[in-house]
Image (cartoon, rainbow, N blue to C red):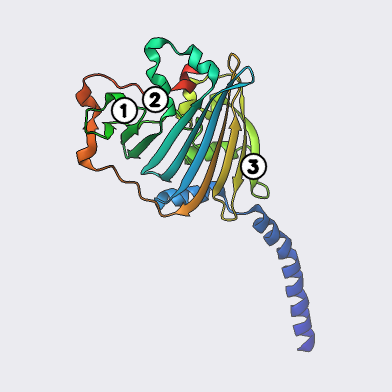
Amino acid sequence: MRRALVGLALTTGVVLVTALPAQAALAAAGPNPVKVMQAQLSAEKGAEVASTTSMSVDGKLMISFKEKGKVQLGKGSDLTFKGDLGPAIYGAIAPEDVYLISALTDTSRVITVGKESYVSGGLVRNALPTGMTWLRFDKPVDSPGAPPIDILATGTLKTLLAGAAPKGGVAKGTISVAKLRSVAPRLRTFATKGNVSWTLQFDAKGLVKRFSATLPSVDGVSIKTETRVSRWGSVTVSPPPGDQVFDADALGEAVPIPDPIAEANK
């Protein structure tokens, strides 16, 4: 009996010693960020975001956009936008388009709930009737400062990580614009040639913490973007008070939301 117990102990020890490296390797791999994001989406969770997108021409900074606020995955977002224009931009704007200066540099706020967006501030100030604060659009609207790559979109995250698994909470790589823009709608205004260089950082739970990318230069125009994500958890995005909202359709004409990134890549 004693021999049997010793034999059993030795056999068990061998099994444990054999299993431990596999378990350690599994633990070292960490959580799957795509599955983690899908779980957050299913639970309609969200996070706070802060992004910076800058545009340079021949190495000189021309425009820098900052956008911050909160995102509820699958539901909407509440984001504040502000742009800073370089000296050369002022000289390039035609007199009849001088409104673009205030539209881009005055603080604006964009709330998107489902398929509707509500915009206030410099982007729509000249279009709003007296006494109204928000202009409602019957479609989702991006601010000019919206990052060209939405890293909180599961499809985008999955596409990036398909060719670069995270190691130590960090993943990095390059991907062609042609491939990435199929899951990143804002990239569809870009030329299809060239590669995007990117870096992703995750926290211990596998949640996105930071994303940065450099887009290929087009006719001397290059774009860099960075998004920092924090405070993952319960998020609620609500539309503004109805008595402060004016319907964009009632204006009788389309209200343009300037998009310097798209214009620069025509």
Instruction: Name above or below for residue 137 compared with residue 161.
Output: above
Indicate the secondary structure of the residue bearing disc 2. helix
Q: Which residue lies under the disc numbered 3?
A: 171
Q: Which residue lies under the disc numbered 1?
A: 125
Residue type at mark 1? Arg
Q: Earlier in the sequence, mark 3 or mark 1?
A: 1
Furthest residue in direction bottom, as rendered:
1
Q: Residues within 10 Å of mark 3 (few under 14, many from 20)?
A: some
Q: Position of residue 46 (x, y in %)?
A: 43, 49
Q: Residues within 10 Å of mark 1 (few under 14, many from 20)?
A: some
The image's mark for residue 103 is 2
- The CA distance from mark 2 to mark 3 is 36 Å
Residue type at mark 2? Ala
- The CA distance from mark 2 to mark 1 is 8 Å
Instruction: Answer left or right for 144 relative to 120.
Output: right
Tell me the residue at 24%/43% (across/down). Answer: 241
Q: Earlier in the sequence, mark 2 or mark 1?
A: 2
